[in-house]
Image (cartoon, rainbow, N blue to C red):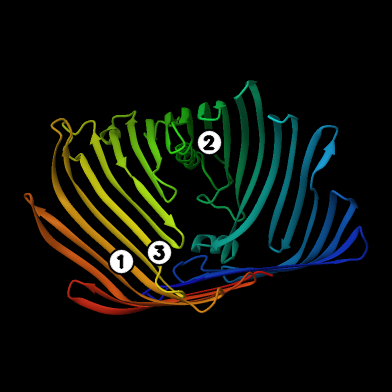
């Protein structure tokens, strides 16, 4: 992937992985791995270039059909921040496809690897265990356990103070992350057509930030995270009716702790501790959700879903005033019609309601209600090789601040939008077909007085885009196309209630394309020339997209 802008910034990413196995016997295989990863980004000032290349040789051993062990060793070349490091590496792993123990099924894998790229050292370890059992066709329980450790060392530039103290140009920051997680899932039928699903998940994570060369401002720190998620859901399903009701509880704790070193005085460490403690937080979310749908007939389907959650965010530090409560309410009602074998109509209605409340007066000026109403019907028609799909939506978004009357710095506002998208495909001749797409967007925003339900518009945007092309099929594997694309965006300001033109952007031009492919190979080439117009300034911009896919 290469991205180029008018400022000559180029980003380049490359990822190559090759694995080769050769069987020595039914139980032994030799293995050869070649991995290469690199990126360069001229926009970044620090870590603008990095690469990692490694060559690994080893064996893979299958003592039984569903159990495998592998050990690999090799050499690694690493480039980061202008520093080239290299050293020996090794990887060991074991995994099972699916072991049957009595009536239980077990899947497990263990991986561990270390990179000795002096003066840095990377470690990666992971243990995954999954145990499940199906007691009956509709009764299944599952337990999962995961333990991980990922340690990485990164260079960063040393300042003048660090250079004088240690005589180095680069410092090294290590990130040592350890995590444990347990999940439990149980599905059980209470009565006919009624199921209960129970789930429980808990995970902990500990992240150590380790600085190689320390000063009074460069110190080690520790982050502890705890997450708990539990839920219960009831589901009923019959031939025509489907119902689901769920309750969920989740909490998360995060604690930041600095580590004092010999360069930090008591007063400085007190200030550092206060800054780290400002990041500590606790959050709690309780939610209820449900779905209901019924087939009124073979051609008419109606349903609804809802979601209500209460989120609480607390910060123990008195220096942090980000404590807040959030109420979120979502309701969708939808209707689906089958007018004929060729025509389908969907009619959904969405209502969203959110209330944000900051606890402390220093932030409560931002307390607000956000209400969204959306109607988005669609229609699909298909007969033979003729296809037409159209959808449009009408959206209204109202944001109302609780203390707008007391504080002049916040103003309630409204945003409305109309969206239309229509696509059409039909054959013209035996080998020539037509594909077209139309998109229209009208949006308006302005100030809002909620109690009087009055508004003063401030901005109107009219956007339209048209794409069509004729496709010539030489065969099932080769196609050529040519067409036309047009884009037009007009912005208007309001003087009183009158719309006054403000700016306009247009782009139009011919398009062409080539598609060659089969089951093993696919080649796509699309190009077009746009004539862009920004006000009175006009420029021609060529565009070219190329994709090549091989299925080995």
**Please, is residue 285 above or below residue 485 in the view?**
above
In the rendered image, which residue does mark 3 sit on? Answer: 425
Residue at horizontal 63%, vertical 57%? Answer: 153
Q: Position of residue 456 (x, y in %)?
A: 12, 44
Callout 2 secondary element: strand
Position of residue 29 relative to residue 497, above or below, is below
Dividing the picture into quarters, in which one does residue 301 lie? top left
Residue shown at 71% from the left, 54% from the top: 123
Query: Considering depth in this image, is 444 or 536 the residue closer to the camera?
Result: 444
**Could you classify mark 3 by the number of other residues whose Cα lies within 10 Å: few (under 14), some (14-19), or many (20 or more)?**
some
**Of labels 2 and 3, the one closer to you:** 3
Res 76 visible: no
* C-beta proximity under 8 Å, tags 2 and 3: no
Asked whether 64 or 243 is in front, the reply is 243
Residue at which label 2 appears: 254
Whether pointer 1 and pointer 3 mark residues with C-beta atoms closer than 8 Å, the reply is no
Foreground pick, 44 / 98: 98
Q: Residue furthest right?
A: 25
Q: Is residue 371 left or right of residue 250?
A: left
Q: Residues within 10 Å of mark 2 (few under 14, many from 20)?
A: some
| Secondary structure at numbered mark 3 | strand
According to the picture, the residue beneath numbered tag 1 turns out to be: 466
Give coordinates of residue 379: x percent, y percent: 36, 49
Q: Earlier in the sequence, mark 2 or mark 3?
A: 2
- Seen from the viewer's position, the closer of residues 115 and 318 is 115
Tell me the element at label 1: strand
């Amino acid at each position: 992937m290469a991205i180029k802008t008018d400022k000559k910034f180029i980003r380049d990413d490359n990822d190559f992985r090759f694995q080769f196995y050769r069987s020595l016997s039914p139980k032994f295989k030799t293995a050869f791995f070649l991995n290469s990863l690199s990126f360069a980004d001229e926009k970044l000032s620090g870590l603008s270039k990095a690469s990692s290349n490694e060559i690994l040789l080893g064996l893979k051993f299958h003592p039984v059909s569903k159990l495998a062990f592998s050990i690999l060793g090799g050499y690694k070349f690493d480039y980061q921040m202008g520093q080239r490091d290299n050293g020996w590496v090794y990887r060991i792993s074991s995994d099972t496809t699916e072991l049957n123990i009595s009536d239980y099924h077990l899947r497990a894998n263990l991986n561990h690897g270390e990179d000795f790229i002096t003066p840095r050292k990377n470690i990666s370890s992971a243990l995954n265990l999954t145990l499940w059992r199906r007691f009956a066709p509709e009764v299944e329980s599952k337990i999962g356990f995961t333990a991980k450790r990922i340690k990485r060392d990164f260079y960063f530039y040393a300042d003048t103070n660090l250079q004088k103290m240690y005589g180095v140009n680069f410092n090294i920051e290590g990130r040592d992350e350890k995590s444990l997680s347990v999940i439990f899932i149980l599905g059980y039928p209470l009565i006919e057509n009624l199921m209960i699903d129970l789930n429980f998940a808990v995970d902990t994570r500990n992240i150590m930030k380790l600085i190689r060369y320390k000063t009074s401002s460069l110190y080690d720190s520790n982050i502890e995270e705890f997450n708990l998620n539990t839920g219960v859901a009831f589901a009923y399903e019959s031939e025509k009716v489907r119902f689901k009701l769920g309750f969920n509880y989740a909490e998360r704790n995060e604690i930041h702790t600095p580590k004092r070193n010999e360069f930090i005085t008591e007063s400085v460490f007190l200030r550092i501790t206060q800054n780290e403690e400002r990041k500590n937080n606790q959050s709690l979310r309780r939610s209820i959700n449900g779905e209901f749908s019924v087939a009124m007939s073979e051609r008419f389907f109606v349903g609804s879903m809802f979601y209500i959650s209460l989120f609480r965010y607390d910060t123990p530090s008195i220096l942090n005033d980000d404590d807040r409560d959030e109420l979120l309410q979502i309701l969708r009602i939808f209707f689906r019609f089958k007018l004929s074998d060729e025509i389908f109509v969907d009619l959904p209605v969405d209502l969203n309601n959110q209330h944000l409340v900051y606890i402390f007066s220093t932030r409560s000026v931002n307390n607000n209600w956000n209400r969204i109403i959306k109607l988005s019907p669609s229609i699909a028609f298909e007969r033979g090789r003729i296809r037409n799909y159209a959808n449009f939506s009408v959206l209204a978004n109202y944001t109302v601040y609780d203390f707008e009357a007391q504080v002049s710095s916040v103003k309630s506002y409204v945003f409305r939008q109309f969206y239309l998208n229509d696509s059409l495909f039909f054959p013209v001749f035996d080998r020539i077909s037509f594909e077209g797409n139309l998109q229209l967007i009208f949006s308006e925003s302005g100030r809002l007085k909620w109690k009087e339900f009055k508004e003063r518009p401030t901005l109107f945007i009219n956007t339209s885009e048209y794409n069509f092309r004729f496709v010539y099929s030489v065969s099932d594997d080769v196609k050529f196309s040519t067409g036309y694309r047009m884009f037009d965006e007009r912005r208007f300001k309001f003087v009183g209630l009158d719309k006054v033109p403000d700016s306009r952007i247009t782009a139009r031009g011919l398009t062409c394309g080539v598609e060659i492919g089969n089951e093993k190979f696919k080649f796509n080439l699309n190009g077009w020339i746009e004539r862009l117009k920004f006000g009175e300034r006009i420029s021609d911009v060529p565009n070219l997209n190329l994709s090549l896919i091989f299925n080995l």
